[in-house]
Amino acid sequence: MKPIKLLLAACLLVAWQAGSAHADSGSALDGGPLGNDVSWPQCGTDLPAPPAFAVVGVNGGRPGTVNPCLAAQLAWADQSAESAGGTPAAVYVNTAAAGPGESLWWPAGNTYGETSVSNPYGLCDGTASPACAYIHGYATAADDAAILKEADGSGVHRMWWLDVETGNSWLWDKAANMAELEGMTAYLQGAGAKVGIYSTAYQFGEIAGAVDQRSNLYALPNWLAGPDSAWSAREYCGAAPLTPGGTVTTTQFTEDNLDYNYRCPAYAPAPAPAPASPVAQPEPARSIRYVELHPAPIS
C-alpha cells in the first residue's frame, strides 16, 4: 500500500501546482490545504503558482541577516488564496543565542538603543545569562521587524514563526536559550503580531528544554518539521506539541527541493490582527548585515 499512497500524494501535488491559486486543488487530504515556504535559497528560481497559503523567510539563514529576495517573495506570497481572503502571508525568522563575543553585539543592560525593556529575569549584566539573552532576543526581533518594514512597509501585522534549529549558535544554558525566544516573542506580541514556533521536538528540547506556564512560549502555535510526504504530514498533526500548551497547526515536508506545508484540518486561522500603533524604533544599536555565527555545542 505504501507505493500506492506515495504515487497518490505525488499526483495530488502535481495537480495542485498546475491549478490556480484560488482553485480547489489547493486543498489536499481531509480538506487540509497545502502551502509553501520560501526564502533566500529560492532566490533566482522559479516559484510555483501562488499556493493556498505561504510563508517567507525574513533572514538570509542567520539572525540579523537579510533575505535578498524578501520583497519579491512577499509579493508572490501575498497572491496566495489565504492572502486574497484577507490574511497576509506569514513570515519566519532565524533564531540564535550566541552570547558575548568580540564580533557580535550582546547587551550589557536592560536597554536596546534608547528603549528600556521590562525584563522578567532581572538586570542584564553583560554575561551569557537569561536576563541578557532576553534583551538580545528582544533586540533581534526589533531588527527583524525593521527588515520587514523596509521590504514592504508592512511592519509586524503578519504571522511570525520563530525558526528554532540546532544549526544556529546556542548557549549551554537552556534557560538562557528559552529567554532568547521569550524576548523575541515579547517584542513581537507587544507590537501586535501573532507568534508561533517552528522546530522539531528533538531540536526544541535540546535548545530550550521544558517550557512551563509562566513562559510566553507556553501556548504558542506550533509548525512541525519532519514529515517526508503529504500523508505523514497529516499524521504529524496528531503529534505532541513543542510546548505543553501549544497547538500543532501546520506541518512541513519537502518534495523536489521545495518545502510544502500542510494546514492541519482542525486549525482555522484567526483573522489578521489590525496594524498596531507604531513601536518606537531606536537608532540601530548594531549592524543587521551578515555575520557568521559559529555553532556552539548543545548540552
Image: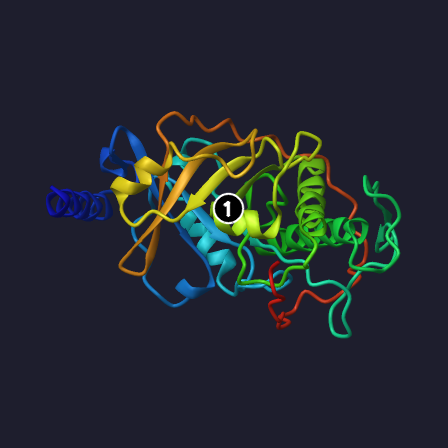
Quarter-wise, where is residue 246 in the image?
Answer: top right
Quarter of the picture containing the N terminus is top left
Judging depth in this view, the residue of 108 and 150 nearest the camera is 108
Side of 291 where 4 appears, left or right: left
Q: Is residue 271 visible?
A: yes
**Residue shown at 64%/62% (left/top)?**
64
Q: Position of residue 193 (x, y in %)?
A: 62, 37
Residue 218, quarter of picture: top right
Q: Nearer the viewer, residue 262 or 298?
A: 298
Q: How crowded is the residue under tag 1: few (<14 C-alpha within 10 Å), some, or many (20+)? A: many
Depth order, front residue of 108/61? 108
- Residue 214 place in picture, x, y as percent: 71, 31
Residue position marked by numbered label 1 in the rendering: 198
Q: Is residue 266 above or below residue 81?
A: above
Give the side of residue 75 with respect to residue 101, left or right.
left
Amino acid at dot 1: Tyr
